[in-house]
Amino acid sequence: MTPPVLALRNLSVAIQGGPRIVEDVSLDVAAGEMVGLVGESGSGKSMTAYAALGLFPAPRVRIEAGAILLEGRDLAMLSQKEWRALRGSRIGMVFQDPAGFLDPVLPAGRQIAEALIVHGDRRGLAARVRALLAQVDLPESVALRYPHELSGGQKQRVLIAAALAMRPVLLIADEPTTALDVSVQAGILKLLDGLRQELGLAVLLISHDLAIVAQTCTRVFVMYAGQIVESGPTEAVFAAPRHPYTQGLLASLLDPQVRSELYAIPGTVPAAGMSPPGCRFHPRCPRARADPCALRPPVLTMRADGRMDRCWLADAD
């Protein structure tokens, strides 16, 4: 069996001297595969992605335990210099707000070339920028245009071209369509899927939009309050979800044939360090029991069909 390109093994991320933000997370992405990581805002999705990039939003946030394996190499203990050598070369990143990650005073072509320049590969820059623009379905003229002259979809394509400049093996896409019009989202998703197939990329797609994940990902990991609560083939998980949280997320998708009103899971995701005892979801769960749900934390359990869930009642009628 081919080893995964990215493998997180029992990864925990914590605020130094404070609570864990991500706890005991394991997932993997193979070459040529797009895997979804889903959950509400505050569930720990983006923090998991930042850990895989060696990037954190605050200096006191750090990897506390576990391994981050890229092509079998553990990255968890790399120095910042070593991380910088990997980011942009072996790992590419696409963020949710392209306008916030493009320099307003530099033309798009110069920004696409930045990764090549930073990593000391200046050969034929102009030709390679043109090839990268073509790869993301943008005309050569975009190279000379500034971010304010581009549409939201074009800005995102420029970011994708920049992420691909050094031919990475892994692409992490954090809510890549959130800031875009619905009419533009489909084009970006089609582009990412095409690049996955063409380049054999491993793609980790982070999203709160289950419909997008259903369209594009072969497998899905559902995250709640810093933990993976369910995982498996996307089609199987969405057809018959076992964890009440996954069931609630799917119920919140408005289907006129099923319901006329939008469903919302009651309550909110607990802040880091504020999770209740027992199952972290039990205060919001319509099926929760005082014992065991409120008393003992469930473990992530492998079922006979290879799917996993973290629920005491997954096998209950």
Image (tube, rainbow, N blue to C red):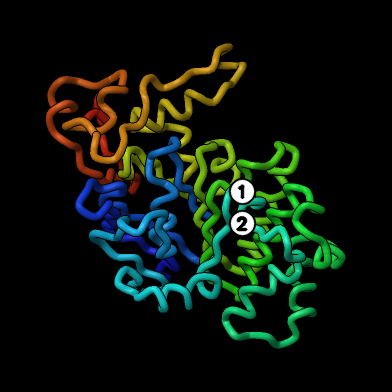
Q: For label 2, count other residues whose C-alpha is less than 10 Å away and answer few (under 14), some (14-19) or many (20+).
A: few
Horizontal side, residue 56 vs residue 128: left or right: left
Which residue in the protein does label 2 denote?
101
Which mark, by number, is residue 97?
1
Which mark, by number, is residue 58?
none
Residue at 24% in and 21% down: 288
Callout 1–callout 2 Cβ contact below 8 Å = yes
Q: x and y percent of residue 130 in the render? A: 79, 73
Q: x and y percent of residue 24 in the render? A: 26, 52
Please tell me whether residue 247 is drawn above or below residue 153 in the rendered image: above
Please tell me whether residue 283 is drawn above or below residue 299 in the rendered image: above
Please tell me whether residue 70 is drawn above or below residue 55 in the rendered image: below
Q: x and y percent of residue 269 in the render? A: 35, 31
- The amino acid pointed to by label 1 is Asp
Residue at 32% in and 68% down: 76
- The amino acid pointed to by label 2 is Phe
Question: On the image, which quarter does residue 10 sit in?
Answer: bottom left
Residue at 61% in and 66% down: 163
Name the one closer to the observer, 166 or 192. Answer: 166
Horizontal side, residue 16 vs residue 55: left or right: left
Residue at 63% in and 78% down: 116
Check disc 1 and report its element: helix, strand or loop: loop
| Residue 241 visible in image | yes
Horizontal side, residue 180 vs residue 305: left or right: right
